[in-house]
Image (spheres, helix red, strand yellow):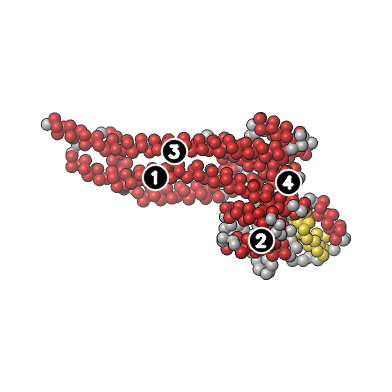
């Protein structure tokens, strides 16, 4: 007989397919043996319901412009409503009415309809992996299986809030230096394109020999003025080529293999990824998600090849019966003090709590490093910009000083 089923795999994704079995119980046993959590099992080929809403319309499986900030807000509101005693359908319905964007409103309407049809919320979320990552869906599934949805969403709200904080701090630290760099480039373009050509006319009337630095600046201005269009095309072409390269398969592979080894910034990047990895593991394990499943779900926390190899190494060690902390100690990506702290918590049966403790300590240190780097980079950029502008100013005024000196001596 043929049975249509919908299930959740070990990574938290929703799976819809058919299976051949003698009875429905046999089909369920076969699916459980594959590591699938069955949410729907019916006789017959059935219709794949993965993309149907309660009204039968189709909704594409993509992010649909749902912003991360909006997802954080909705998650916190669901947590608050569930903690106050509301049911999940009631909470989704209330948030649908006050959603700030059409994309979020449509998403909440689809989720509510699927839950009303008897589909677990985690399975409905699995239809939109671009919005709800594996950790989000696994924590939801854990809450459904234990009947503690309010506690589960409280943990999810904390998880997404931490992610938003890290993202905001990194972006905030980068905005001012980037603005300074763009301002410096704009000042230089204005000087070479408009200011220096006017000084050339002035120097021609003075009929004086120009110093080497001034002559160099004039030659640069002439070159930029005469070839500004090809230079602009070269700049645009370079930017487009870089974007195309990083969006290609080869570019993504190269970047994921090398971005953690960038000079100066590489060390901070590794620390940020490590904190994120430990937090994902800690949140999942503390909410009764299996260790192997937690390790696999953490792969979605980073695209770094080096950290994927670390996760593979830890998975292999756990499969062999060794401890997580022991495997982490063998990796050069993990500081020995952090691995020792995790091993101590693991030995006392508090692996999840120790991972969260280490993640919070790392995040605190990372915030201090990011703030310090930001405070160092800003004056360095200002000094560099001042040096360039000062050099140009001195080069422009030196011939005028020479003419004034000769005139006074005459």
- Provide the residue designation for mark 4: 287
C-alpha gap between disc 2 and disc 4: 23 Å
- Provide the residue designation for mark 2: 92
Return the disc, 2 or 1, that comes first in the chain's sequence.
2
C-alpha gap between disc 3 and disc 4: 42 Å
Where disc 1 sits, the SS reads: helix
What residue is drawn where x is 70% and y is 59%?
A: 86
- Provide the residue designation for mark 3: 378
Return the disc, 3 or 4, that comes first in the chain's sequence.
4
Crowd band around label 3 with a 10 angstrom C-alpha radius: few (<14), some (14–19), many (20+): some
- Provide the residue designation for mark 1: 183
Left or right of 82 in this view: 183: left
Return the disc, 1 or 4, that comes first in the chain's sequence.
1
What residue is drawn where x is 70% and y is 37%?
A: 354
Do residues under tags 2 and 4 come within 8 Å of each other at their CB atoms? no
Task: Kindly tell me whether residue 262 is visible in this rendering.
Answer: no
């Amino acid at each position: 007989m043929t049975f249509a089923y919908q299930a959740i795999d070990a990574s938290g994704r929703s799976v819809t397919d058919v299976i051949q079995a003698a009875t429905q119980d046999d089909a369920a046993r076969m699916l459980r043996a594959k590591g699938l959590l069955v949410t729907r099992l019916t006789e017959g080929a059935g219709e794949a319901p993965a993309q149907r809403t309660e009204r039968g319309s189709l909704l594409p499986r993509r992010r649909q412009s749902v912003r991360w900030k909006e997802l954080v807000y909705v998650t916190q509101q669901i947590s608050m409503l569930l903690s106050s005693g509301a049911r999940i359908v009631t909470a989704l319905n209330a948030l649908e009415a006050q959603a700030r964007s059409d994309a979020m409103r449509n998403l909440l309407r689809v989720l509510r309809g699927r839950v009303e049809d008897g589909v677990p919320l985690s399975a409905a979320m699995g239809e939109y992996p671009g919005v709800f990552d594996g950790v989000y869906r696994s924590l939801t599934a854990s809450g459904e299986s234990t009947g503690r949805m309010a506690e589960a969403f409280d943990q999810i709200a904390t998880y997404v809030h931490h992610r938003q904080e890290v993202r905001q701090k990194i972006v905030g630290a980068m905005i001012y230096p980037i603005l300074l760099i763009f301002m410096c480039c704009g000042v230089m373009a204005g000087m070479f394109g408009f200011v220096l050509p006017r000084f050339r006319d002035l120097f021609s009337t003075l009929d004086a020999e120009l110093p080497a630095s001034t002559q160099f600046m004039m030659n640069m201005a002439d070159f930029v003025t005469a070839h500004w269009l090809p230079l602009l095309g070269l700049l645009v072409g370079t930017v487009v080529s870089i974007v195309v390269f990083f969006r290609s398969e080869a570019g993504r592979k190269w970047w994921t293999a090398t971005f953690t080894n960038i000079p100066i910034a590489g060390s901070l990047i590794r620390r940020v990824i490590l904190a994120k990895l430990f937090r994902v593991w800690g949140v999942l394990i503390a909410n009764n998600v299996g260790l192997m499943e937690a390790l696999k779900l953490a792969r979605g926390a980073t695209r770094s090849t080096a950290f994927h190899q670390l996760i593979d190494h830890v998975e292999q060690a756990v499969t062999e019966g060794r401890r997580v902390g022991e495997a982490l100690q063998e990796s050069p990506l993990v500081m020995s003090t952090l691995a020792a702290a995790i091993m101590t918590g693991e030995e006392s049966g508090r692996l999840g709590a120790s991972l969260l403790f280490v993640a919070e300590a790392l995040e605190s240190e990372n915030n201090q490093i990011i703030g310090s780097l930001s405070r160092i980079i800003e004056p360095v950029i200002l000094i560099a910009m001042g040096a360039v502008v000062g050099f140009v100013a001195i080069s422009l005024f030196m011939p005028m000083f020479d003419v004034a000196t000769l005139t006074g001596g005459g």
